[in-house]
Image: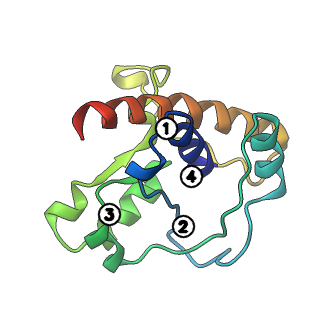
Amino acid sequence: MAEGIFRHLVEAAGLGGDFEIESAGVGPWHVGEAADTRARQTARRHGIELDGVAQQITAQDFSRLDHVIALDRDVAAHLRGLASNAADRAKIRLLREYDPQAGSGWERDLDVPDPYYGGSGGFELAFQMIDRAARQLLAQLRVTE
């Protein structure tokens, strides 16, 4: 969902030519498969089509990426282990670092909960978190790049 939401926001802002956007998992579990049906349905309700297929990130990918955005701390930790140097590790951020509703201090929750094993309500919650954070990420990237 994150790739589709961010792509939608970038295109709506007329910046499609300024960004290369892709998503990848840290494991091979769903490589080549479309997004979960519930994720596609949730995104479609918001006017977004998810048409990508799953792929797996590799250590070599870091050399061509400017930003590596993780949806939870476990994935971020895995990515840090995959990165071959400090410069690549510095590219890794949690998406909800940009979410104005993520809280602050010790209450700050930066993980987007994985809705895979729950009902469709979890996909809507994840969508809302991702959308809020992606809007702020795009705003920040527009200022700094």
Front position among marks 3 and 2? 3
Labels 1 & 2 near each other (Cβ < 8 A): no
**What is the number of the mark on residue 72?**
none
Q: Which amino acid does label 2 sit on?
A: Gly
Which x, y percent locates residue 104? 37, 20
Q: Which amino acid does label 4 sit on?
A: Glu
Q: Which of marks 3 and 1 is nearer the N terminus?
A: 1
Q: Name the residue under label 2.
A: 25
At 44% across and 42% down in the image, what residue appears?
15
Labels 1 & 4 near each other (Cβ < 8 A): no
Q: Which of marks 4 and 2 is nearer the N terminus?
A: 4
Q: Is residue 123 found left or right of 81 in the rendered image? A: right
Labels 3 & 2 near each other (Cβ < 8 A): no
Which x, y percent locates residue 49? 74, 49
The CA distance from mark 4 to mark 2 is 12 Å
Q: Name the residue under label 4.
A: 3
Q: Earlier in the sequence, mark 1 or mark 4?
A: 4
**What is the number of the mark on residue 14?**
1
Q: Name the residue under label 3.
A: 65
How many C-alpha atoms fall within 10 Å of the one at disc 1: few (<14), some, or many (≥20)?
few
Q: Which amino acid does label 1 sit on?
A: Gly
